[in-house]
Image (cartoon, helix red, strand yellow):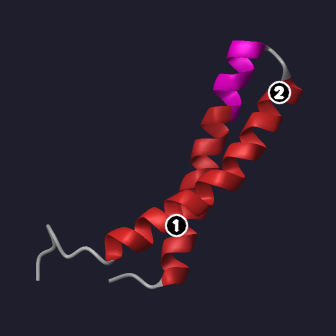
Amino acid sequence: MENGRRSLLKAVSWRIVGTIDTFLLTFLVTGKLVWAASVSALELCTKVFLFWAHERLWNRISWGRDV
């Protein structure tokens, strides 16, 4: 089982990758840097928490683990 700090660090590092992707895609679709930055900042805040919560929930489920 992972501890909470490791789950949080994984969530943050993954969201950095995801946020860069969101920024680039939003910019390509809209052509506006402000929109791309706004959407990226919003999704960064929400998805770090959602990923962390998802990881913590899955740590409670033993299904599929090698014991």
- According to the picture, the residue beneath numbered tag 2 turns out to be 35
Q: Earlier in the sequence, mark 1 or mark 2?
A: 2
Say which of 18 and 59 sits in front.
59
- Horizontally, residue 1 falls left or right of residue 31, namely left
Point 73% across, 39% down: residue: 40
Considering the whole magenta stretch, tell me its main secondary structure. Answer: helix
Badge 2: residue crowd in 10 Å (few <14, some 14–19, many ≥20): some
Q: Residue at x 25, y 73 (%)?
A: 61
Q: Residues within 10 Å of mark 1 (few under 14, many from 20)?
A: many
**Any magenta on residue 29?**
yes
> Is 62 situated above or below 19?
below
Location of residue 42 (image quadrant): top right
Q: Is residue 18 magenta?
A: no
Establish if 8 lies above or below 43: below
Give the magenta part as a residue range.
Answer: 23-30
Q: Amino acid at mark 2?
A: Trp
Residue at horizontal 54%, vertical 63%?
Answer: 11
Q: Position of residue 15 (x, y in %)?
A: 59, 52
Q: Which mark is residue 37?
A: none
Q: Identify the residue at image location x=68%, y=50%.
A: 44
Give the SS element for disc 1: helix
Give the CA distance from mark 1 to mark 2. 26 Å
Identity, as a three-letter code, of the amino acid under mark 1: Trp
Would you identify the image quadrant in which residue 57 lies? bottom left
**Considering depth in this image, is 7 or 17 the residue closer to the camera?**
7
**Which residue is tagged 1?**
52
As drawn, 63 above or below 22: below
Q: Are marks 1 and 2 in contact (CB under 8 Å)?
A: no
- In which image quadrant can residue 12 be found? bottom right
Q: Secondary structure at mark 2?
A: helix
